[in-house]
Image (tube, coloured by chain):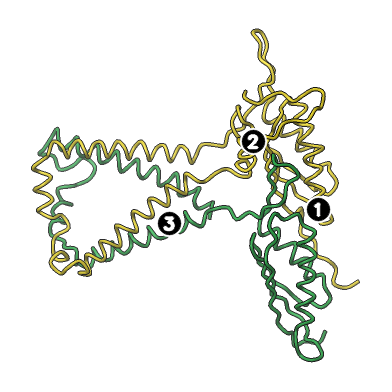
Amino acid sequence: MSTTDAPADGSTVAAPPRRVLRGSRRAVARSARVDRIWLGLLGFVLLAAGTLAALLGYGVFGAGRAARPLLDPLIVDALRAQQQLWRWVAIAAGVVLVVLGLWWAVRSLRPERRPDLLLDESEDSTLLVTAGAVAEAVTDRTAALPGVGRARARMVGSPGTPALRLTVWVTDDADVADVCRRLETEIVAEARRALGLAHLPVAVRLELDSVTRAPRVA
Amino acid sequence: MRALLRTLSPLLGLALAAVGVILVIEVVTAWVRPASSGLVVPWPAWQLVLSELTWSDRPVKVVSICVAVVGLLLLLIALLARRHDVALTAPTPEMTVATSPQVLARLVGRTVRASDDVAAATVSASARTVVVRAEGWPDPDGSFRGLTDTVRGRVSTLLDELPLARRPRISVSTRGRKEPR
């Protein structure tokens, strides 16, 4: 594990490294960046191909071109002239499509990682805290804070750079700033101490506990 | 929109992989057995049809426009599926605090509707703007300046209390009610 141990004497800890700051932003929610990029690329290719074909059909590039067959004899002849080469190109394109498509599908369907924390490892023993145990402890402690109706915690990230995702349902009368402050000083700091971590990026998502309507008539 | 993205992504990935498999199978089949008429796709029949169709034929135009529309929809889904979180100030740099625009809108709506001057209100919110459309009763001079000021003041006080990383702009529009107060 790349995380460093927390100082036992309570001395000031150095500023968190950049990866820790990035970790808290990434932990807010599961990233959909790759899916968005691939979907955007596919959409752009289809949009460009469809638009160009429609413009060609409506004669924007000349009436002669619009009257040519879809499978142009010129292109067919060019392919037949280098048949061996184009066969290999087609097979390579097919293999690339299979690999990319399967990678995309598997990546999209893969559940998010919940890293366990390896606290100590020696030749004959291993001390491991499961992600579920950490999440349960943090959930229970958070739900007991004043102004918090319920809470849900989850370990995310990788075993080397774990992070904590906290969803907190605050009550109507909650002081949001105070809840955030208490989360840091009472929950996260304690979790860091207990797990022996100098840094633990945390992403907090605030929700309203329930819809309560203020009385219009006293 | 993100749910649609999560649903479409594996389906499109599998579709791409299927196209790749069919392409490889057909090319290898045509290479090994040149006389065959295709293992999965009847490509000799398709070749014949594609040789007879021209770019200006109506079916080709219709399919082209449909492909462009599908592409545009996919592009819009990809662009709109980003997160629209409202960032809040965190007590330490190791912490990121965020909430949804819906939560901010609910908080604002509850505050605005609690005022006796407001009969009804609809609120939409984002990280940049909070738009309030309030219904109430006009001032004695017939204007809605009092209602607007009340709503704006309440929203402003609420935004001051919330630890927002960026204060959104407040936009208030008012409408009169015919019924007596």
Q: Give the Cα separation between the discs numbered 3 and 1.
A: 39 Å
SS class, disc 3: helix
Looking at numbered disc 1 in the image, what kind of residue is underneath it?
A: Thr
**Residues flagged by tags 1 and 2 on a common chain:** yes
Residue shown at the point (79%, 52%) measured from the top left: A176
The answer to whether B27 appears left or right of B18 in the picture is left
Q: Earlier in the sequence, mark 1 or mark 2?
A: 2
**Front in this rendered view, residue A129 or A63:** A63
SS class, disc 2: helix
Chain at numbered mark 2: A
The answer to whether B62 appears left or right of A198 in the picture is left
**Front in this rendered view, residue A164 or A13:** A13
* Mark 1 crowdedness (10 Å alpha carbons): few <14, some 14-19, many ≥20: some
Does residue B174 sit above or below B57 in this rendering?
Answer: below
Q: Residue furthest right?
A: A218
* Mark 3 crowdedness (10 Å alpha carbons): few <14, some 14-19, many ≥20: many
| Quadrant into which the N terminus of chain A falls | top right
Q: Which chain is green?
A: B
Q: Which chain is yellow?
A: A
Chain at numbered mark 1: A
Looking at numbered disc 2 in the image, what kind of residue is underneath it?
A: Val
Residue B50 position, x and y percent, is 16, 56
The residue beneath circle 3 is B75
Looking at numbered disc 3 in the image, what kind of residue is underneath it?
A: Leu
Residue shown at the point (37%, 39%) measured from the top left: A100
Q: Give the Cα separation between the discs numbered 1 and 2.
A: 30 Å
The residue beneath circle 1 is A171
Q: Which mark is residue A20?
A: 2
